[in-house]
Amino acid sequence: MSVFAILLLVYASLAKASHPVCHLMGMPEAPLLSREGDVVIGGAFSIHSKITHPHITFTEKPAPVQCSSINFREFRFAQTMIFAIEEINNSSTLLPNVSIGYKIYDSCGSTLLSIRLAMALMNGQDATMEASCSGQSAVHAIIGESESSSTIVLSRTTGPFKIPVISHFATCACLSNRREFPSFFRTIPSDYYQSRALAKLVKHFGWTWVGAVRSDNDYGNNGMATFLEAAQREGVCVEYSEAILRTSSRERISSVVELIKTGTARVLVAFLAQSEMEVLLEEALLQNVTGLQWIASESWITARHLATRRTARVISGALGFTISRSTIPGLSDFLLKVSLSENSSVVREFWETAFQCKLSGESETKFPRQCSGSENLAELKNPFTDVSELRISNNVYKAVYTVAHAVQNLLGCTGDEHRSDNSTQNRECKLRENVKPGQVLRYLHGVNFSMPSGEDVYFDQNGDPAARYELVNWQKTAAGDTVFVTVGEYDASLPEGHQFAMNSVDIVWAGDTKSRPRSVCSESCLPGYRQAVIRGRPVCCFSCVRCADGEISSTVDSTECTKCSLKFWSNEDRSRCTPKQTEFLSFTENMGIILTTFSLAGACFTIAVAVVFFCFIDTPLVKASNLELSFLLLFSLTLCFLCSLTFIGQPSEWSCRLRHTAFGITFALCLSCVLTKNMTVVMAFKASVPGTGVPQCSLPFQRLSVLCCTLVQVIICALWISLAPPVPYKNMAYSSNKIILECRLGSAIGFWAVLGYIGLLAALCFILAFLARKLPDNFNEAKFITFSMLIFCAVWITFIPAYVSSPGKFTVAVEIFAMLASSFGLLFCIFLPKCYIILFKPDRNTKKHVMGKAHVKSQ
């Protein structure tokens, strides 16, 4: 058939150039319904829904295709076209004095027959064998068809001859291609908009896992392709997508229904023509497919013959978009006037099928009852007489009026402003010449008028009308009948985000329930989790993975976790970012309390030692301990204990500067005293007269030594503070879930210079004490200083790696511990033995014992 269509187009091109149309084909079939007129409108409807293909033997000419099973709805479309034409012919304002005729053909929903009726509409009924003919088409415009595939064939066939085709029901988006279909128009919106509306509908109700079935033709394939594309953008996945035709085998239909029944998707998008929906629904009834939420395409959502009590258990609660409902005054009465007097074969067939009887002389019908011919159409309840849902019929009605307005504009009878004379209204339209289809086509592009209902009719650059839909829901009445209730709207002309709106009407879902069904491949991920795609499955099938530390997801079904900013951290549920906890060594926490206690206890012990020394200041042991250096050493030790308190608490500008300078200067003072004490002891034992005590010349030396050694540290600290002082710093890099408040050193060289100088003094103290260890035991405190320096050096040597590797507030705690440990070492090793003798061994606190005479006598 595709080859035939190509050859047909070639012939058409040649005919357009030089040959008459009547030579393209032989004698065409006569129309089912016709009337002559000045302007003739062709009609193409699927008045029969079943066809029987002849058996082809390839030895004789095939018999014609047989059509059967009259379609009441399509027959109503044809009668609506006739009603509109008669209404225009009786109008005094629209095309007065110009009669409109019609030629209506039946395509039976077959693309093959669509080509035949296209040729019939172009050629006319009269056969000619002459070498040339007028080349004038038998019709000026064609209204039809009801299916996209048939309309495509019709438009491709008539397109080269510039015969406009206005469809009332062909929604395939492919027909909007102006390069392929330059003469095509329609009064129904394109599926380009309907498919996207269906995708938004599915997403609106939270259905991310759906099944899909479509008609295996241009309508279904193009519409479903657009839906799948839009659904993917909306995050909706399709479990399966199957295609069927009404002519498909029973096995094929059964397998599709079986797949629908066993699938996990609880929502089914059925982009089907009515004929395919009928066969699918019949099989679904046989297999008792229940519990599905059906999403309907425009073609069948308002098909009354599908919404019966029998089908309600399978398809109740269906949802779908359709064009707006309208009323056509006078149409109902016109339909009831159809009678056998028209002497038409299709009217006779309609009559027999509607009343289930046979007319006299008819032997082919299967109805046993004889028709009287006086049956009343008003008693019928079928799609032909049902005018409660005039949606597609209204499209036929608008299509006829569109052609009439185009012809009126062509003839120049649109108003007196176009006339040169002054006659009243001047609505006379005269055929100045033969109206050609190409002229009607040209004026169709500019048609813009309002119907009596107030609806504006116009076409865009692609020949499409404005895309506005109603969302219809199948609901049951108290009597058990199904009604179509409008529950929402979709207007494609509005901005994105405002196109889809729901009404306040409650929706009835599958199974006539009030609760919305769920259809997801995987259950929703709660806040604090993200979706992780499962390999080999659609993106809607996922596992829920908890967000990592420092990341959150605040909504349901988040596809990724959001990282918190530097100053924030995720809460326990990973659902929101909270400010990070600040960490520093506080006075109120256990570690701070312990270190504060030891610091104050050390200061108290030091003061107690000073009090003991002051109380026993006149005893030989205290006098022999070099009072000035001892009290200065005790004072510096007190400061060493107290300066550790500056390291506790939240860092600030003053505390960061004070803690490091106080630490450096007090320890330098302390070690300067110890170093001078060592040197004094050595000098004392080198004196010529042991009983004379410390030489007086050593006192200025002692003071100068302590001052000079301490002053060096003061200079180092002053340079450090002035050039690059320590400052408070929020360390967010070390720990991810907390902010460590610490003092940034400012200059690492300054810090290590202070620490290095203290180490130098400690090393000198240790060397001198080690050299003086063999002096007389009773007076010699060098060995105690040696022990204290061993402790001091060991503490600060181990401090370095511990300080570098300790996290957060433990860095400060290690530093405080080193200060306290070294201070306690000095206090206990140097002063504890003397306090013990002063307090508990007063017999040894004598001059003789101190001078070592008791030791000599014993020897």
Image: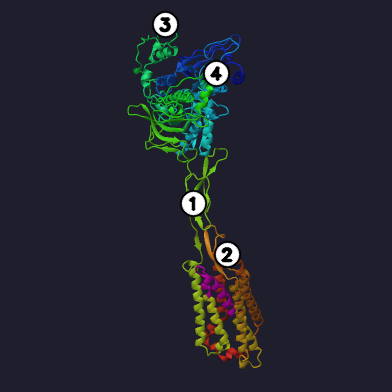
Name the front one of labels 2 and 1.
Answer: 1
Q: What's under tag 2, amino acid-wise?
A: Ser
Asked if the residue under mark 2 is in contact with the one under mark 4, i.e. CB atoms within 8 Å, the reply is no
> In screen coordinates, is 708 left or right of 408?
right
Q: Is mark 4 on a helix, strand or loop?
A: helix
Report whether residue 477 is seen.
Answer: yes
* Residue at image mark 3: 361
Disc 1 from disc 3: Cα separation: 84 Å
The first of marks 3 and 4 along the sequence is 4
The first of marks 4 and 2 along the sequence is 4
* Residue at image mark 2: 806
Disc 2 from disc 1: Cα separation: 29 Å
- Does the magenta run of residues contain 460? no
Q: Is residue 528 above or below residue 588?
A: above
Q: What stretch is highlighted in magenta?
A: 643-670
Q: What's under tag 1, amino acid-wise?
A: Arg
Q: What's under tag 4, amino acid-wise?
A: Ile
* Residue at image mark 4: 115
Q: What element carries label 3?
A: loop
Residue 550 lies, in percent from the top left, at 52, 54
Residue 623 lies, in percent from the top left, at 56, 89
The residue at the point 58 percent across, 77 percent down is: 665
Q: Which mark is residue 574?
A: 1
Q: Nearer the viewer, residue 374 or 31?
A: 31
Disc 3 from disc 4: Cα separation: 33 Å
The first of marks 2 and 1 along the sequence is 1
Q: What element carries label 2?
A: loop
Name the front one of labels 4 and 2.
Answer: 4
Disc 1 from disc 4: Cα separation: 65 Å
Report whether residue 215 is seen.
Answer: no
